[in-house]
Image: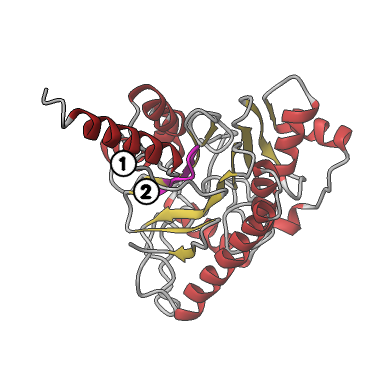
Amino acid sequence: MNPIKWPLLVSLIFALFIGGCDMDFEPDQEEVPEFAIAIHGGAGVISRDIDPEIRDAYLESLENALEIGRAILDEGGTSLDAVEQVIRFMEDDPLFNAGRGAVMTNEGRHELDASIMDGSNLATGAVAGVTTVKNPISLARMVMENSRHVLFATQGAETFADQMGVERVDQEWFFTERRYQQLQRALERDAVERDHDGEESSSLKYIDDRKMGTVGVAALDRDGNLAAGTSTGGMTNKRFGRVGDSPIVGAGTYADNNSCAVSSTGTGEEFIRNVVAYQICAIMEYTGVGLQAAAEQVVFGKLQPNDGGIIAVSHTGEIAMVFNSPGMFRGAANSFGRFEVAIWD
């Protein structure tokens, strides 16, 4: 090398090295939100011609529910608390098929299911077929935190509720006239229906059919912990203690800090057969693909059209809300200021 140019080359290398050390340089990577949350209130064939007042009522309720979760996370609350409190709100809202406003069984009763999962340690709790518990999601959390078991069903869950001292109500608390009329139509056709199947009120233009009102939440908190929960009243005119995917860990609910948190809504049997919630998390963990791609692979590749959808949050704060039906009541928020609710695409 020309000796005249060598000192110049050394100086350039030294300058680049020093400059590089002083720069606050990051790889080409998107900034990660400090918290994120997604919610759903059911997916299915939801007519765009529904009565504007009904549409606005759903959107307002979704906004209120989302704000509860956003505020908890923004103030440093845990993802578990956000999941539980948002679902409690939705269980108390008769618009949704969970808690008050739940659909009715063949016997004219309300049988409620719920589950919750902590992504930091894979702890989980669930209840199925409860009939007197005002907020099943809270009892599910008590199963997780106050027992060595995962799932209590029917009378066993009621006995556990006695021990935990949770708020109890009569069946009348869950009753709504709309659900009663829906059951009567199903009984006439001897059909098992999902939430708003066969609702044909042309005056309301309410929902065409097959809309599922299960509620669910997935959240990431400031400590980097994920959680998910789901609650439902099941299917109209269901018989013989039928249980869907909502209280089944891996099908209706799953959370793992290594991948994501997921809550499902739709045809429960199909979500159970395809282990939908867990499969999305597993695809992320084992293949390294992003949340959106993993969710689409399962919802569009494994489920049948109109089976329903999922909401999910990844360990990096990515939000996915994927459904293979015409609509899904849903919302999303994060620490960057995102705050939105929607029904259709």
What's the amino acid at mark 2? Val
Q: Residue at x 72, y 36 (%)?
A: 141
Q: Amino acid at mark 1?
A: Glu
Q: Quadrant of the N terminus?
A: top left
In the foreground, 165 or 217:
217
| Residue corresponding to mark 2 | 322
Residue 308 vs 185, above or below: the answer is above
Q: Residue at x 61, y 36 (%)?
A: 225
When asked about the image quadrant of residue 132, the answer is: top right
Question: At x 64% / y 43%, what residue is drawn?
Answer: 79
How far from the left and from the top, in percent, is residue 277? 46, 34
Magenta stretch, main secondary structure, is strand
Secondary structure beneath disc 1? helix
Residue 78 horizontal side relative to residue 295, left or right: right
The type of colouring in the image is secondary structure
Secondary structure beneath label 2: strand
Q: Position of residue 134 (x, y in %)?
A: 76, 50
Q: Is residue 249 magenta?
A: no
Q: Is residue 109 left or right of residue 49?
A: right
- Position above or below: 345 against 40: below
Q: Which residue is the site of mark 1?
A: 296
Pinpoint residue 322: horizontal percent, then vertical percent. Answer: 37, 48
Q: Quadrant of the C terminus?
A: bottom left
Q: Can residue 266 be seen from the camera position used here? A: no
Specify the quadrant of the image occupied by residue 23.
top left
**Label 2 packing within 10 angstroms: few (<14), some (14-19), many (20+):** many
- What is the tally of numbered marks visible in this picture? 2
Residue extent of the magenta highlight: 310-321
- The answer to the question of whether label 1 and label 2 lie on touching residues, with beta carbons closer than 8 A, is yes
Nearer-N-terminus badge (1/2): 1
Question: Which residue is at the far front?
Answer: 4
Residue 43 seen by the camera:
yes
